[in-house]
Image (tube, helix red, strand yellow):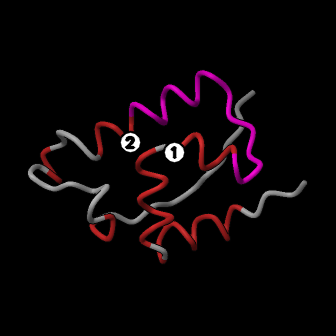
Amino acid sequence: MTVDLKEIEKRLNNEPDYQRRFLNDPVGLLRDEGLEVTDTIAKNLNDFVKNLSGGQPAVAGSNLAANPQEVGIGISIGKSF
């Protein structure tokens, strides 16, 4: 199965329901799209999204899960040797 990251990114930035789903369960959404997510990456992604939608100063007082248009989401993949 081929995963189209550009399509996921496009949907994340254009479909409020998809954005909410990502903000509520980023790892589940990516796995449902066919992306393999290691346990370490899953923990880091969950922690990042939890902090983003919770107590970060830049978004203090906002609820991104309820109003996801406040953030743009990008996807990048890297490999280190």
Q: Check disc 2 and give the amino acid type.
A: Val
Contact between labelled residues 2 and 1, with CB atoms less than 8 Å apart: yes
Return the residue nearer the eye: 80 or 44: 44
| Disc 1 crowd, CA 10 A, few/some/many (<14, 14-19, 20+) | some
Tag 2 residue: 49
Residue at point 68%, 34% (across, down):
37
Mark 1 vs mark 2: which is more N-terminal? 1
Tag 1 residue: 26
SS of the residue under disc 1: helix
The answer to whether residue 2 is left or right of residue 64 is right
Relative height, residue 15 to residue 42 (above, below): below
The answer to whether residue 37 is left or right of residue 52 is right
The answer to whether residue 65 is left or right of residue 75 is left
Q: Quadrant of the C terminus?
A: top right
Q: Position of residue 71 (x, y in %)?
A: 33, 63
Q: Quadrant of residue 36?
A: top right
Residue range (magenta): 32-47
